[in-house]
Image (cartoon, helix red, strand yellow):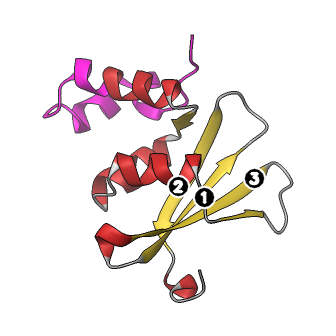
Amino acid sequence: MCRILSAHAQNQSGMNRLAGLGRGFVCFLRLLNCAMGYILSARAETIIREREIAHEWLDTTMNTPELLLPHESDPTLYHALRRIPAFGDRILRVIYNATQEPSVIVTVYFDRTMKGKL
């Protein structure tokens, strides 16, 4: 069984923020992420929802990154980067903890500093 690190799973009031999606749908998404080999932190869930980052972009970046970098100061973290053609070739950066099984995505964002570098 997959461990869920989401504040939504630990805090009923957190579920209220996703009430429009329905509790069953949120649980389904979490299980799907586990099947894909990663889970989302509460912060990553919020960012993906607010910035409307497609899960398929996240999956592609995690499964076939164009560039994989270790974190500068934390040896447990890695940065997976990939161009997203459907979003104007912007670079998606996914920072995740590779020491946990499954990997835990800490944060995700489009990295403006990497544009034209991949």
Question: Given the image, on which type of amino acid does mark 3 rest?
Answer: Leu
Secondary structure found at label 1: loop
Question: Given the image, on which type of amino acid does mark 1 rest?
Answer: Pro
Residue at left 34%, top 33%? Answer: 14
Q: Quadrant of residue 3?
A: top right
Circles 3, 2 touching at the beta carbon (< 8 Å): no
Q: Which residues are magenta?
A: 1-26
Secondary structure found at label 2: helix
Tell me the number on the disc at residue 65: 1
- Label 3 crowd bin: few (<14), some (14–19), many (20+), radius 10 Å: many
| Residue 74 lies within the magenta run | no
Q: CA distance from mark 1 to mark 2?
A: 5 Å
Residue at left 86%, top 54%? Answer: 75
Query: In this figure, which residue is indicated by the disc labeled 2?
Result: 61
Taking 33 as reference, is 66 left or right? Answer: right
Tell me the number on the disc at residue 77: 3
Q: In the displayed orientation, state which residue is furthest to the top.
A: 1
Q: Earlier in the sequence, mark 3 or mark 2?
A: 2
Please name whichever residue, 79 or 46, is drawn nearer the observer in this view of the structure: 79
Tell me the number on the disc at residue 24: none
The correct choice, above or below, for 118 with respect to 116 in the image is above
| Residue 23 lies within the magenta run | yes
Circles 1, 2 touching at the beta carbon (< 8 Å): yes
